[in-house]
Amino acid sequence: MDANVPKRKEPGKSLRIKVISMGNAEVGKSCIIKRYCEKRFVSKYLATIGIDYGVTKVQVRDREIKVNIFDMAGHPFFYEVRNEFYKDTQGVMLVYDVGQKDSFDALDTWLAEMKQDLGPHGNMENVVFVVCANKIDCTKHRCVDESEGRLWAESRGFLYFETSAQTGEGINEMFQTFYAAIVDLCENGGKRPIPNSSASFTKEQADTIRRIRNSKDSWDMLGVKPGASRDEVNKAYRRLAVLLHPDKCVAPGSEDAFKAVVNARTAVLKNIK
Ligand code: GTP
Ligand code: MG
């Protein structure tokens, strides 16, 4: 059994688990925890210094769970403090601010930091990750949409929730699902349960949608060089259409990606005699 699986795992018995929060400074990690544990929201920013620690008890099905929460500071300055706390973790709350693209782009860096600190024998496969797309109340400033966040999370087998610590939207549901998934993991001998939706699309589809979103022009989107022949363009288009057709692909964002590919093909063909 993996080292980070708690020993006491018989159904009905109480369970002690460790969860940590991760994500850039100011994305709302502490406020999410405060909203859940204290049912309140603080609008003034009080940066976490190093780590905040708290214990809470929750009920999941027939089990009482004692949750040790380590709320980490997001600021790079606290790296040395954080790196002691990654080990023996059963659950990670990975938070970004939907109005700060940088905080979304940084999620990979956070995973890399954890991986590096766990070392070659650390196992992140046996950890439940929940991605919180936070501050959804700030609709005017939103720049990372739901499909983009969901795709990033679900293509890695992570849970995904849209949350607002300010209004409380999504918070209870997120924690309940998160804790239930950790209990499932403990009862499943330490194997992360696969969320239903992650099985329904492939990594190739997820990567292609991400590539299409980030492409710089229509040629790039189709994956052909400027000056490609009509045949090459149609071939590239057909390959993408088969991969992303909404009848066949249920990955978040596939419909928009499919439409973008259709438009790209039309635009490119106009320029070929
Ligand atoms: P560090 O401790 O520095 O890593 O930051 P943090 O991620 O813990 O952020 P914190 O919870 O302290 O919140 C940062 C700021 O964002 C505060 O001013 C909060 O009031 C605000 N905030 C947090 N969540 C929300 C939210 O859902 N909506 C809005 N509008 N503001 C939020
Ligand atoms: Mg904090």
Image: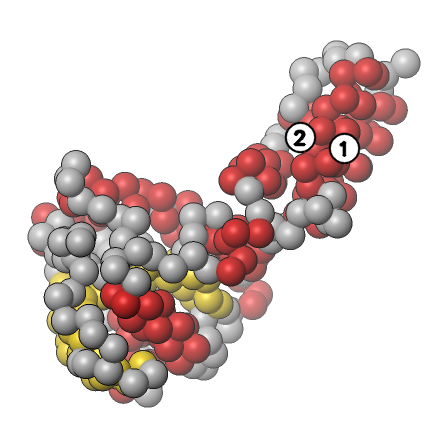
Q: What residue would you read off at disc 2?
A: 221
Circle 2: element type: helix
State which quarter of the image contains the C terminus. Answer: top right
Q: Which mark is residue 264?
A: 1
Q: Quadrant of residue 193?
A: bottom left
- 148, 187: nearer the viewer: 187
Q: Is the CB atom of the residue marked by disc 1 within 8 angstroms of ligand 1's nearest atom?
A: no
C-alpha span from label 1 to label 2: 7 Å
- At x 25%, y 60%, the residue is 189
Indicate left or right for 68 with 269 as reference: left
- At x 10%, y 48%, the residue is 80
Q: As shown in the figure, which amino acid type bears the numbered disc 2?
A: Met
Residue at far right of view: 273
| Residue 33 to residue 206: above or below | below
Indicate left or right for 98 with 56 as reference: right
Structural crowding at the residue carrying mark 1, measured as other residues with C-alpha within 10 Å and reported as few (<14), some (14–19) or many (≥20): many
